[in-house]
Image (cartoon, helix red, strand yellow):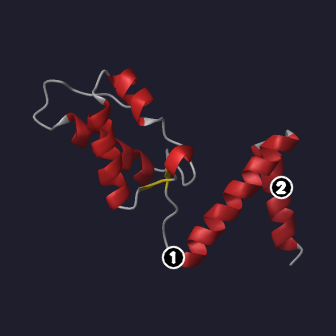
Amino acid sequence: MLTIDPTSSTPPYEQIRIQIADLVRDGELVPGTRLPTVRRLAGDLGLAPNTVARSYRELERDEIIQTRGRHGSYIAMHGTSNQRHAQAAAQAYVLRLVELGIGMDEGLEYVRAAFQSR
């Protein structure tokens, strides 16, 4: 998903930061998505772990990701407080549906029915 252009004048840590930020902006990485570990991404891209760690620090500073210690780094919730709560509720709902073996279309039908019954 991420690539590094070794001929670019943009440093590798910045290439990673830009690509992840773009994926979030374009909706390809949604809040709650877990990112690869620093070591794994560094290995996949052929970079030093400190390079990837710097990218993650910059993304965290910009509130694009959040790091949960040993639990990893995730795409951060964004928007107003209500929007962040809604994103968290949606993540919890999707995780539960996956546990139950229910797909997206059926899950969306349940959400539509719940809204209509209000």
Point 81% across, 47% down: residue:
97
Quadrant of the frame with the N terminus: top left
Please say whether residue 68 is visible from this viewpoint.
yes
* Residue 30: x %, y % from top left: 54, 51
Residue 10 placed where, x, y %?
14, 38
Relative height, residue 111 to residue 12 (above, below): below
Q: Say above or below: 84 vs 76.
A: below
Q: Name the foreground residue: 26 vs 75.
A: 75
* Residue at image coords 39%, 61%: 63
Outermost left residue: 9
The residue under label 2 is 109
SS at badge 1: loop
Q: What residue type is labelled 1?
A: Thr
Residue linked to disc 1: 80
Give the CA distance from mark 2 to mark 1.
Answer: 26 Å
Secondary structure category for the residue under label 2 = helix
| Residue 108 at x, y percent in the picture | 78, 54
Label disc, if present, on residue 27 of the rendered structure: none
